[in-house]
Image: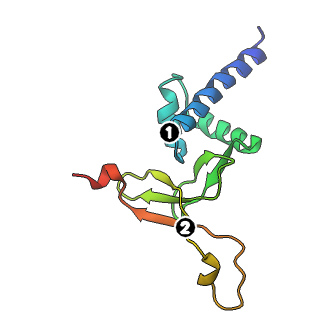
Amino acid sequence: MTDTDRGASRDTRQRRAIRAAFEAAGRPLDPNEVLELAAGSHSGLGIATVYRNIKMLLEEGWLTAVELPGEVTHYELAGKAHHHHFHCRACGKVFELNACLPNVQKLAPLGFQVSGHDLLLYGACRDCSCP
């Protein structure tokens, strides 16, 4: 086995650990959350490797970016139906909302045509709001 083969195999194991972290979480993750979750199944995983693999998974179309105003970018599995997000201000976690506002076009000023929208709710998640 050459050094190149070993590197490719190491990258594969790291990428598998990162993929598994996203699949297990079932919600958008930031790179530090990915590191924390993936490090349990792949010791020696570093933040630079997480960022590099997230970039590759974005390029492959396996992940998509979730932009939050004033926050680090989160990432989630690609290919999901239109949905929105909830950001817990207490713990920082981001969750998916499986609902959308009906008749969004009616919210726009007269004569405007809506071509898309994003909705982000803020507050405390179930874990942070329960005593």
The amino acid on which the numbered mark 1 sits, given as a three-letter code, is: Ala
- The residue lying furthest to the top in this view is 1
Quarter-of-image position of residue 89: bottom left
What's the residue at 53%, 56% (across, down)? Answer: 98
- Is the residue under label 2 in contact with that under label 1 (CB below 8 Å)? no
Q: Is residue 79 left or right of residue 37?
A: right
Crowding at dot 2, Cα within 10 Å, few <14 / some 14-19 / many 20+, comes out as few
Disc 1 to disc 2, C-alpha distance: 21 Å
26 w.r.t. 130: above or below: above
Front position in the image: 48 or 113: 113
x and y, in percent, of residue 69 in the image: 54, 65
Front position in the image: 40 or 61: 61
- The residue lying furthest to the left in this view is 131
Residue linked to disc 2:
119
What's the residue at 63%, 27% (across, down)? Answer: 16
- Residue 25's label in the rendered image is 1
